[in-house]
Amino acid sequence: MTQPRRSFQIGTGLFILLGFAALAYLATQTTSVANYREGDSYALKARFSNIGQLKLRAPIKIAGVRIGSVRSIRLDTTTLEAVVELAIDTRFRELPDDSSAAIFTSGLLGDQYVGIKPGGSPDMFKDGDEVVLTQSSMQLEDLIGKFLVGGGDSAKPKNDASPAASPPSPDPAGVPR
């Protein structure tokens, strides 16, 4: 009776260890720890009025492809804006200087990242330049508040007082159309 009980305990222990290993793998793959590589890069700065939950080492992406990471975040005490320093991999040196940066969320409740939309300027960013066109993070709480309070146009009732909504008028012979 001791032999089957002992193998059951070993099997349970192995199952628990595999579960912890799977959790550790998922934790590193879903956070900014995965794919983090600090190689040759150049710095760009971007100012945002609200960065939400953006963190150090958050990815910077163009078309979903990681091109760098957030190097530092600080508050400008004069303008009270968040100044985010972006470390862009030198392989992506050909980034037009009229490109825009926005803060997005991966999935519904995922980590935030900086998305860059390339512009069309023939001039390229240089080390230390600032991204002028920025869009702050959309806060889930603000969106829910707008929906509940009815701040959006979609929550307003439609006014169907157009001629098409009025009852049909009779034609000159007195027969409704």
Image (tube, grey):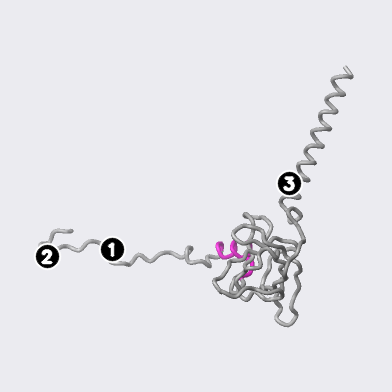
Of all residues, the one furthest to the top in this rendering is 1
Residue type at mark 1 is Ala
Mark linked to residue 129: none
Q: Is residue 11 positioned above or below 24 on the image?
A: above
Q: Please provide percent x and percent y for residue 56.
A: 76, 64
Residue type at mark 3 is Leu
Judging by the rendered image, the residue that carries numbered circle 2 is 172
- Nearest to N terminus: mark 1 or mark 3: 3
Secondary structure, magenta segment, majority class: helix
Residue at 75% x, 61% y: name it.
57
Q: Please provide percent x and percent y for residue 114.
A: 66, 64
User: Which residues are drawn in magenta?
Assistant: 135-148
Circle 1 crowding by C-alpha within 10 Å: few under 14, some 14–19, many from 20: few
**36 lies left or right of 114:** right
Residue type at mark 2 is Pro
**137 lies left or right of 10:** left
Quadrant in the rendering for residue 141: bottom right
Residue at 79% x, 33% y: name it.
15
Distance in Å between CA atoms under marks 1 and 3 = 57 Å
Distance in Å between CA atoms under marks 2 and 1 = 19 Å
Tell me the element at label 3.
helix
- Nearest to N terminus: mark 2 or mark 1: 1
Circle 2 crowding by C-alpha within 10 Å: few under 14, some 14–19, many from 20: few
Mark linked to residue 164: 1
**19 lies left or right of 110:** right
Tell me the element at label 1.
helix
Q: Please provide percent x and percent y for residue 70.
A: 73, 65
